[in-house]
């Protein structure tokens, strides 16, 4: 990525980036003053009205006196976004990409300029609700030094239904959004749900962990970067989780072209993490067990007792290890996905 030719920054002193990213003469340096504790990072591509509403909700819901900065990375918007960005002052810092570099590169670029010890990645199409941030911080604190990436519950603005309560592995061996939010009584006593991954639409992580993991893999194009980062955190011994009491609203996939590369991104993810996907799929294996038990219910004597017992215990969360048959079913489903990906995209030419 030839950043010097593709971007310009509206502040130039952060992270020693002066030579590569000259400051705009018409824009004051917004990186001066004491370092903030939190850096909010928001990539933009058009959708100006959603951006303005999202930023208004951000400022309305942050704790009073919170030392923070908001880094806005524009990926070549043409709808008036750039003209509006030119009117912003502190705590906003603006980065202008000359063309659309995509989600991973935009976020990586912003993190290199960030000064906070905490990073919060946000989509520009969110409506943030009171208490969302503090509850994510508390979820992180509850995990202690094991804490990885923290997400929250996201409701679809249009329907009001849960769109994200973590990311899990489905029966096809693919990552999908969990759509079940625990009942309120359960959330009262268990406000944090450990999950394989969380979406980058609203994600909290310490900057030192981000740097340790190397940030987003730029081989993904607008999808899969967040899941890949979460699985790298898991591989490093960290625990990813959802703060179940932190709730926001999301205009889901409102950015143009958001879904164009989904299957290619999924192929890349599965090539790197397919073994870990199988190992991180208790919801999928419990679902297999429930289906198996329902199938044998009319004639239980026809089923093998050890398998039926194992399936029942696993389905009831009393046995963490799934039956071998459940794992084999998941592996077979994933192999079918691989066959379809190879048919569509050919054999991979790059290592992951």
Image: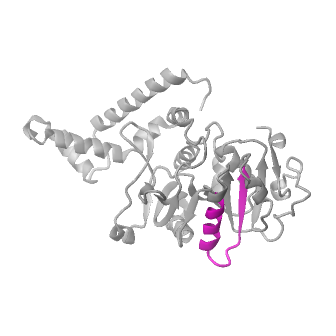
Q: Is residue 262 left or right of residue 309?
A: right
Residue 185 versus residue 52: which sits nearer the camera? 52
Q: Looking at the rendering, which quadrant does residue 347 occupy?
A: top right
Q: Which corner quadrant holds the C terminus?
A: top right
- Reply yes or no: does residue 28 show up in magenta: no
Position of residue 174 measured from the top left corner of the image (x, y, whole percent): 44, 39
Residue drawn at point x = 80 percent, y = 38 percent: 2
Number of numbered discs overlaid on the protein picture: 0
Position of residue 151 measured from the top left corner of the image (x, y, whole percent): 52, 58
Residue 231 versus residue 98: which sits nearer the camera? 98
- Reply yes or no: does residue 55 show up in magenta: yes
Position of residue 244 measured from the top left corner of the image (x, y, whole percent): 44, 64
Q: Is residue 316 left or right of residue 73?
A: left
Position of residue 60 measured from the top left corner of the image (x, y, whole percent): 62, 73
Q: Is residue 17 left or right of residue 263?
A: right
Q: Which corner quadrant holds the N terminus?
A: top right
Residue range of the region highlighted in magenta in the rendering? 51-74
Residue drawn at point x = 50 percent, y = 55 percent: 240
The answer, for residue 106, to whether it is visible in the render is yes
- Colour logic: one colour
Residue 308 versus residue 41: which sits nearer the camera? 41
Q: Is residue 6 left or right of residue 327?
A: right
């Amino acid at each position: 990525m030839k950043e010097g030719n593709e971007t310009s920054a509206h502040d130039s002193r952060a992270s020693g980036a002066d030579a590569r990213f000259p400051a705009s003469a018409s824009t004051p340096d917004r990186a001066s003053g004491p370092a903030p504790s939190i850096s909010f990072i928001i990539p933009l591509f058009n959708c100006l009205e959603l951006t303005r509403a999202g930023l208004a909700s951000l400022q309305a819901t942050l704790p009073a006196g919170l030392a923070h900065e908001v880094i806005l990375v524009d990926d070549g918007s043409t709808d008036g976004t750039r003209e509006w960005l030119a009117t912003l002052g502190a705590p906003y810092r603006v980065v202008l990409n000359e063309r659309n570099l995509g989600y991973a590169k935009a976020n990586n670029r912003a993190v290199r300029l960030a000064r906070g010890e905490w990073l919060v990645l946000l989509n520009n199409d969110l409506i943030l609700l009171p208490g969302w941030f503090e509850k994510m911080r508390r979820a992180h604190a509850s995990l202690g030094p094991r804490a990885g990436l923290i997400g929250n519950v996201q409701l679809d603005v249009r329907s009001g239904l849960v769109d994200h309560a973590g990311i899990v592995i489905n029966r096809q061996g693919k990552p999908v959004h969990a759509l079940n939010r625990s009942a309120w009584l359960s959330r009262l006593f268990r406000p944090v749900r450990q999950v394989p991954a969380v979406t980058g639409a609203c994600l909290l992580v310490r900057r030192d962990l981000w740097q340790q993991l190397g940030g987003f893999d730029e081989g993904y194009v607008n999808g899969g970067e967040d899941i890949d980062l979460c699985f790298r955190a898991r591989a490093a011994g960290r625990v990813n989780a959802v703060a179940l009491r932190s709730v926001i609203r999301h205009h889901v996939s409102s950015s143009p072209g958001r879904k164009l590369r989904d299957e290619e991104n999924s192929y890349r993810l599965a090539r790197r993490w397919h073994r870990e996907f199988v190992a991180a799929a208790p919801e999928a294996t419990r679902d297999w067990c429930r289906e198996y038990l329902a199938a044998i219910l009319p004639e239980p004597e026809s089923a093998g007792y050890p398998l039926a017992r194992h399936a029942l215990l696993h389905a009831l969360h009393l046995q963490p290890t799934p039956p071998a048959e459940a794992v084999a079913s998941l592996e077979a489903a994933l192999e079918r996905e691989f066959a379809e990906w190879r048919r569509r995209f050919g054999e991979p030419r790059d290592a992951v």
